[in-house]
Amino acid sequence: MKKVFLLVIMTISIILAAKPIEDTKPINALETKPLDDWEYNATKEIENGFGQSGMLMPSPMASAPIMMEKSIGLAVGGAKDTNNFKENINHGFLPKLDSITYEGQFYQHYFDTGLKGECKELFCPSYVSAKRSNPFTKEEEIFLSVGLNSDIKIADFKRKKLNLVIVLDISGSMGSSFDQYYYDKFGNRQNIIQRDNGKSKMRVANESIVAMLSHLKGDDRSGMVVFDDNAYRAMKLNFVAARDIDAIKKHILEIQDKGGTNWSAGYKAGVRLFDNIENSSEYENRIIFLTDAMPNRGELDKEGLFGMAEDASKRGIHTTFIGVGVDFNNDLVEFVSKIQGANYYSVHSSDGFAKVLDDEFEYMVTPLVYDLSLKLDSKAYAIDAVYGSPDANKATGEIMKINTLFPSQKSAEATKGGVVLLKLKKTKSTDNTIALKVSYKDRNGELHSNNQQILIENSQNSGIRKAIIVSDYVNLMKNWLIDSRAACHDQPKWVDQKPLILQKRVLIYPTMHPMYLMISEWERASCPVKVSDGYKKLFSIFAKYYEGQMKTLKDDSLNIELDIVKQLINTKAENPKNDNQMTKDPKN
């Protein structure tokens, strides 16, 4: 009898396994046991159609604890750290250009936004102006900071419920060491000391996802897709309360790396999980895309990842990119993160990322302000450069644009990453007043505006002074990276031309600098850190200037940048090609 029973069960199992994924009817979670609905099978490619998700209704869960600060601040989307830049230098690798961004570096600091009075709107811009003598050119420069303030109280802040889809890169490169470049093993391997207990990128990514799931509530929905050369559905979108979370976490920790990298297939499959989810003002739709960002298929065009992420954003599906490992390609992701509602983080240990999630998760998934536009109306000033937004290239002489503002932590009167810095160009007019008009949309699509008129003066506000020297640091690092990569494998056409006098351009806005040409493929072997004699001298001059500013501001947090500069000063000096003018006295 037992044999017959087992035979029947096996027959039914075979029939069910042969069928395409079908939908199940919603079941009340209160009447069922937690569900282990894990689907991922590495031998089966994802279907083109998904049908409905077979969701279960959630049971009530307690709300997350509320922080007690008076109100939240705001910060721009895009990069939320510069960890990849620091980790590459720490391991002797030359970082990628966009591993350090202005918004990412700003987000490492708290800024006094210069707000006077009380903010009574979702977004209240505050403006502070300052003048300074450039430490290298000695020219007078004029800056305007835009403080990012909000009237939302911490006690009132509440993220929307989440429809969260995790898209995980499981390609072969994810199985490599966390602190090595995957493509080094094809002829340029580096000998380095492993960190994070020698974990692979795959292991750290898996552990980061498990940490992330712990921040979801019962009425959130979650789903998951994994991809290599193909895409595989691991979980349908389903209510968290309906799932056996412990079983799901175990499955995630068992995921292994394999195959190539097809970003587009993974992202497309992630978007399809939303196809049968009705749009609701109660829910935020978000894809969290974990990768070491080394795709060997697909391109950043309308048919590739960029186009799909842009189309998804128009549908109200926003994206967070999480880069794993020192070989994470920030240049690629910084490009994609310009899309509305997008942001990205760099992960360099699973424990470190878990700590970030403890502080940041609610903010990471909650864009608040969209399509921010600032118009400057003045006969005397024009916008010369923008620091602190991935949308800086959208600036003109009159207009500054920012796609997205996210909530940000406040400490006393300072806001984490809470400024955008404008460099102004002076005309012959003697009128020092400017009119500033801001317009933006809230997350319900309602249009708001704010008009102010200010006088350009030389304020000693700590927020703008801090933003200026942090921008100086990023300018210097970016120009160093551009020049250093000219001696690596990018082979720019301008490398044989007579270079500009180094000290005359190291603090120039990088878009005015000749840009190296990137190779056509995104996979990269490592480049060693190289600091020329000219840059070593300039780093020393800058360090002295920076230390003086830091003492004036009485702000020890600025050691973040100073420590990196000193580390580069102490590296082995090398003289790249055409570096003959780099050692001239910067006073000349």
Image (spheres, helix red, strand yellow):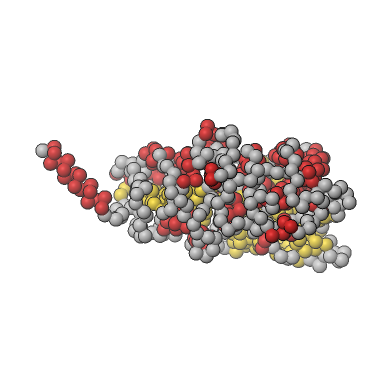
Number of labels in the image equals 0
- Residue drawn at point x = 50 percent, y = 50 percent: 289
What residue occupies the far front of the structure in this picture?
187
Q: Observer-nearest residue: 55 or 545?
A: 545
What residue occupies the far top of the structure in this picture?
197
Q: Observer-nearest residue: 473 or 121?
A: 473
Q: Is residue 25 left or right of residue 323?
A: left
- Residue drawn at point x = 53 percent, y = 45 percent: 186
Q: Is residue 495 left or right of residue 321?
A: right
Q: Residue 68 occupies which quadrant of the picture?
A: top right
What residue occupies the far left of the structure in this picture?
1
The answer, for residue 567, to whether it is visible in the render is: yes
**Image spot of residue 98 (x, y percent):** 64, 51
The answer, for residue 454, to whether it is visible in the render is: no
From this view, report whether residue 371 is shown above or below residue 84. below
In the rendered image, which quarter contains the N terminus? Answer: top left
**Image spot of residue 360 (x, y percent):** 56, 43
Q: Is residue 320 left or right of residue 146?
A: left
- Residue drawn at point x = 74 percent, y = 36 percent: 570
- Residue drawn at point x = 53 percent, y = 43 percent: 185
**Image spot of residue 276 (x, y percent):** 38, 59
**Image spot of residue 30 (x, y percent):** 32, 43
